[in-house]
Structure formats: structure tokens, C-alpha cells
Amino acid sequence: MTDTDPHVVTLEPVTAAVIRETVPMGELTAYFDRTFRLVMEVAAAQQVAVTGPPFAAYHGMPGQSVDVSGGFPTAGPIGPSDGVTAMTLPGGRAVQLVHAGSYDTLEESYGRLMTWMEHRGLERAPLMWETYLTEPTPDGDPADNRTLITWPIVD
């Protein structure tokens, strides 16, 4: 389910600290738990401020595994440490929508976004990302999760 209709935005580049790995789809939750904790530790140790919620950038379409960079936007570049490196999320035109609900239903929102782009003749870039606007909790309702999906447009 989506909370918003797909819409075109213009983004500024964003500096981030990430861990990039190829991860089997069934191990993504463990990857995110480890990655988000470690990125926060390295950013704190280097006194680099985290400036927004966690995200996962996907380098191409997932299959049985996915090439993913998980991390946080930062106030400046981070030095490489413990697998954490700097990354820049690209600026330019992109299509965004907010997915409301469980991560298990994200595929529906991706389908809606891709169809919307195709109908408008917008070419999808190979990199897309999800920003996790709400933090899931063990006793929380997955229906309360909000995920911003961003897919850059090839101009």
C-alpha cells in the first residue's frame, strides 16, 4: 500500500556513510541490524554527524541476492573504517513515493512506481533507495511503517 502517489522531485546529492555488500535476500534483516549499528558507531568515533534516517541503496535489481549499501546520510564524508565507506546518493530528477505498511509489501509499491514511470516514458536509473522514515519495533504494528522509495530518472 502506498501513502502517496508517485511524483517527480529534484534532489541535491547527499553524502552518506554505508556498508556495501552482496546479501542473500533472506539475510537482509540481519545485514541491516549489523550495518546500521556499525555505521552509527563509526560515525560517532569519527565525529561525523548523522543527518537523517537510515536508508538502503540497491545497485541493480535484486534476485536471490542483492548488491546493497546500507547506512545514513552524514554532514560530511567519513573515512573508511570497519567496512564503512563514504557514498554519495546522486542528485537530479527522481520519482518518489511513500510506502505505508510492512516491508513484506514493498514489492507492490515498487510495481506501482515502475508502472507509473513506464507510462510517462521515464527511464529508471540502475540505483534506487529506500529511506526508513519510521523505526520498526518488536511490539510495533508493521502497518505503521513508512518507507520513502526514491528511484532516479535517467535524463
Image: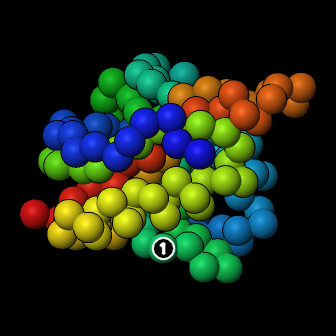
Q: Which residue lies at the image location 43% right of the left edge and 72% below the top edge?
A: 60
Q: Residues within 10 Å of mark 1 (few under 14, many from 20)?
A: few
Along the viewing direction, whichever of 10 and 115 lies nearer the viewer: 115
Image location (x, y in percent) of residue 57 = 46, 54
12 vs 53: above or below:
below
Q: Quadrant of residue 63?
A: bottom right
Image location (x, y in percent) of residue 119 = 26, 67
105 vs 140: above or below:
below
Question: Looking at the figure, which quarter contains the N terminus?
Answer: top right
104 vs 78: above or below:
below
Q: Give the amino acid at mark 1.
A: Met
Whether residue 58 sits left or right of residue 150 in the image: it is right
Question: Looking at the figure, which quarter contains the C terminus?
Answer: bottom left
Q: Which residue lies at the image location 37% right of the left edge and 66% below the top edge?
A: 115
Q: Quadrant of residue 64?
A: bottom right
84 vs 50: above or below:
below
Image location (x, y in percent) of residue 70 = 54, 49
Image location (x, y in percent) of residue 42 = 56, 33
Along the viewing direction, whichever of 149 and 31 lies nearer the viewer: 149
Whether residue 83 sits left or right of residue 121 in the image: it is right
Q: Which residue lies at the image location 61% right of the left edge and 27% below the top edge?
A: 134
Q: Where is mark 1, residue-wise?
A: 61
Is residue 33 at least partly visible in the picture? yes
